[in-house]
Amino acid sequence: MTDRADVAGDTGGTGTGVTDVAALAGALRKAVRGEVGFDVTARALVTMDASNYRRVPLGVVAPRDADDVAAVLEVCRERGVPVVARGGGTSIAGQATGTGVVLDFTRHMTALVELDPGSRTAVVQPGLVLDRLQEAAAPHGLRFGPDPSTHSRCTLGGMIGNNSCGSHSVAWGTTADSVRELSVITARGRRLRLGQGWAGAPDGLRELAEGELARLRTGFPDLPRRISGYALDALLPEKGADVARSFCGSEGTLGILTEAVVRLVDSPRARALAVLAYADESAAAEAAAGLLPLGPLTVEGMAADLVPAGAGLPTGGAWLFVETGGETAAEARARAEEIVRAADVVDSLVVTDPAAQRSLWRIREDAAGTATRMPDGTEAWPGWEDCAVPPARLGGYLREFRALLAAHQLRGTPYGHFGDGCIHVRVDFDLLTEAGVGRFRRFSEELADLVVAHGGSLSGEHGDGQARAELLPRMYGADMVGLFERAKAVWDPDDLLNPGMLVRPARLDENLRFSVLPRRPVDVAFAYPADGGDFRAAVRRCVGVAKCRTTTVSGPAVMCPSFRATGEEEHSTRGRARLLHEMLAGDLVTDGWRSPEVLGALDLCLSCKGCRSDCPAGVDMATYKAEFLHHHYADRRRPAAHHSMGRLPEWLRWASRARLAPLLNTLAATRPLAGLGKHLAGIAPERDIPRLAPRTFTGWWRKRKAATPGAGGSPAGGTGDHPAPTPTPAPTPARTPTPGDLVVLWPDTFTEHLAPSVGQAAVRVLEAAGLRVALPPTLLPRKGAIGDGGTRSAAALLTARRARVCCGLTYVSTGQLDRARTVLRRTLDLMEPVLRAGVPVVVLEPSCAAALRTDLPELLPDDPRAARLSAAVLTFAETLERHAPHWTPPAVDRPVAGQTHCHQHAVLGDAPDRRLRAAAGLTGELSGGCCGLAGNFGFEKGHFEVSRACAEDRLLPSVRQASEDTVILADGFSCRTQLDQLAGVRGRHLAEVLAEALDRADGER
């Protein structure tokens, strides 16, 4: 980086204009005990929040305590460098970005200092995540009232800075309603303890307020979600002259929060959720205010265009989610049913099961991400994310809002806190062109006037930031905005803290994060069908809602295991997306695809694909990683692990042909030789090398066929080696039903060479279910087209060469995409007769099935066979459900533990597996998360500790807690290997469990 940099930039902030960055960094390192990061990665991670804006800071400091904060302010004040406080970085208006020094409170100042159930208060540091406070308060029957949808990663400091609210504000108000005292350090180093009765007021604040009492009494709209501007009316004597409350919502512009005393409320013992269906959102909005006298905890609204298919909601075009509480489940339900009776609805549903409620609430909470794409895939952006009007006027406002959208030829999907009149919406602004940005400005100005006409607030939850501060005069008038400026000067006379926000703001169409991206698409290997083939659009998917920063997950969720293991933003999905964005921008990360910073961030990505399903915006970091590695190592030397494990199918086929399995197993068991081999192969020394099977799965298959003439039908002939005009059915064992559909069983690399027992078990079960099993063809023509299913000449057969199908997974995960495409084209050639016959393809290894479902068509988008094979792929459970629907599995009648494979969760889904387990009497739930081995990841040198930490997150605890008779299920070879190597536990594929039960049942006859 350069030694000198522009400090103030175009944010409107003050400062020296140019500062010596090296001297600033050195002074900070001497002054503070926390981390000081002025490197490219540290800066790139905080250039953006969840807004449309981007600013490049000089550096980042993670203070350890209040003394560190004071030291940073002193160093920066001496040099005129702005300071921005940052929590979870989920702000939607741009207030968590800045050009000076960013204070990151999420690393160290995260403590719950004290929780006093008697006084119903808690003392918290600003970096404490809300969910951690809720977890600590819950055993006492208490909770913190406000709960934004980002509750699993937003911080208390950020909530105070924005005066956040959340879905329960109709019951418990805003964050300001829950604040008792605040410890603050001003830009000039004064330590203040803010509270009621002018406690902690800086010099001049009381005089300012008492000189403007009339304006403070009449200049603020009366509505529950008035977040815009400074809350100076809290300083009125009749409101207790509450300096702490007036500080809430100041967006880090008045002082830096170091500690807070917050109020807790009683948490209902039981809750019920009434889901009320209406014809459209306006009808739902008009009904919301009428429900408030019944005392609901929430009144949330959303329309059909944000609800995924099969969500289980009652029939309608829009819904209100109305939560009620009570001392008992019956009391909560009675209140919910009372609300249903009082509401004029199209349809309704009352849900009392906590798991079912969480599932429905997840739809609402994910809306901030799902709303970033219109139904046709068009991008949509914040900017007018949370305007609020009086609840009684919400229906009329929404109709006029829709009309305004139409007038500007824009689209948006309103949702949000209907009971408080607060609407969230993302609009399909074109922020990439000059004309589109101009429309964005015109729409913003007209919408601000519309909100004001309805007596509303430009911000009802997320603050003004850069998105709305410029328009505050339209809401408050010039005189009130002038009073805001005077208040800012009392607190921060040097304009050091978050300049450009709230007063003397930057323009709403400056600093847009899209303006720095390349104007033309970059050349890429994947097709990115959901993003129009544009890698820039794929990277733009990350809007910063930061669900990947959740430190604890429940249910089947996976994302983001590396962040939970390290706690570092760099190793979150969002952090990696930010670095890719800066790589495309090119002014901070300057090495493009060769960037060591991006490589470092992606190094600990497990390619678990969890973000593909768990990220509300659908970020697919596994694909982005493969893309990056493909370009990064083009014409360069690759790590040894890319050769040893990326080309694993080749090495294992070679070892099989040479009959080297016994020798290699002996060498792997000899410690010195194994150590040398691991060193040369780039394998972690802590790992044991898995043993090769003495006989491959296809070797077993051939021997079985030879012992039973005609066994093993194939769409390409008896053993899968020769073409045939029609499929040859497998013989039916006497104990199975009448033969049914033909299926092709995919011999993936892991099943073939390392775990053939899984393939054998699958054959046993599939045939027991009445299906005919075949293997894929293995003859590939040197010339001609044996793969067309029609070539029959002896010459063609004699010149054909043997080959094996492969999903290309190991090549994809190591970024060897050219080789992956070659392998996949060969696979398609081999599978041609299978595809022509329309035979389903059963894939036992979830990661291989996921690769065929997604990577194959995205790497070969112009080959129609790729889409056909992708569509033909079925999991083991899907095959039984679709092609043997009347088959009853054997009764196992045992509990299960283990983990749903991360690729199965993210790409394939596990509903058929759940139903199959239930039919077999396998009870209990599998955990979510990732096993941490993740193919080559956990074997690579330098990854062992993170790999083990990922396993300790969910998988290993679930297994340790299991009873002795529990079946440990693990369909993935990586999962089974991790269990074996870290816990000494043998995990089994579901097919193995069912096959064993079949054999046991046969033996009992």
Image: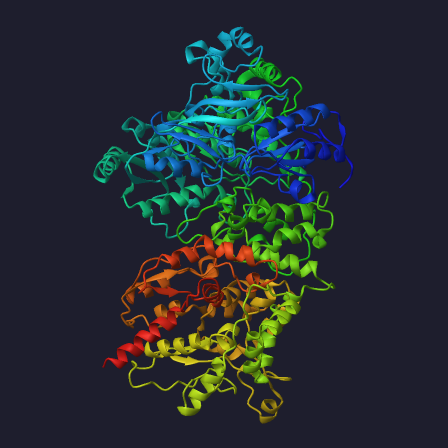
Residue for point 59% across, 64% down = 685
**How many numbered discs sit on the rendered protein?**
0
Residue 536 higher or lower than 999, as above or below: above
Quarter of the image where the C terminus is located: bottom left
Percent x, y of residue 683: 61, 65
Place residue 224 in its image quadrant. top left
Place residue 813 in its image quadrant. bottom right
Near-viewer residue (441 or 741): 741
Residue for point 60% across, 48% down = 577
Near-viewer residue (323 or 844): 844
Residue 763 higher or lower than 457, as above or below: below
Residue 903 higher or lower than 836, as above or below: above
Colour treatment of the image: rainbow
Percent x, y of residue 670: 57, 75
Percent x, y of residue 416: 42, 35
Q: Inspect this view and state whether residue 507 appears.
A: no
Near-viewer residue (692 or 87): 692
